[in-house]
Image (spheres, grey):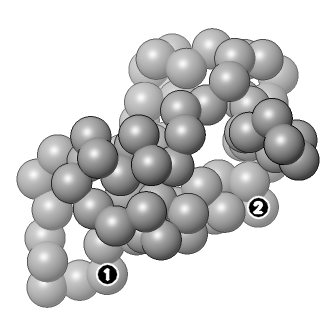
Amino acid sequence: MDLDRSVPVWPQVADELRRRLDAGKYKPGERFPAVNDLAAELDVAPSTVQKAVAALRAEGRLRTVLGQGSFVKE
């Protein structure tokens, strides 16, 4: 992922994750990758991914189960 560091990074990460969801990379009901795994893959801080995931959760695209992680909403 090519990031524009002149603008906030977390919205760019959220856009990338939306693209992946729209493309079907993560299927409904499937466990979403862990924040630390995505942070390492995208070469960003875990807090950046947390903000992006929170945005997707607010949009109703993900749900989080305490102690289990985030899942793609059906």
- Does 48 sit left or right of 3 as displayed? right
**Would you place residue 63 above or below residue 13 in this image?**
above
Q: Amino acid at mark 2?
A: Ala
Tag 1 residue: 8
- Residue 61 in which image quadrant: top right
Q: Quadrant of the C terminus?
A: top right
Q: Residue at x 14, y 85 (%)?
A: 6
- Residue 59 visible in this rendered orientation of the protein: no
Which is nearer the eye, 26 or 37? 37
In this view, the residue in front, 15 or 36, is 36
Residue 10 showing in the rendered view: yes
Query: In the figure, is residue 74 to the left or right of 9?
Result: right
| Residue located 66% across and 63% down the image | 54
Report which quarter residue 70 is drawn in.
top right
Look at label 1 and name its amino acid: Pro
User: Residue lying furthest right in this view?
Assistant: 66
Which mark, by number, is residue 58? 2
Q: Is residue 21 left or right of residue 39?
A: right
List x then y, in percent, for residue 2. Answer: 11, 53
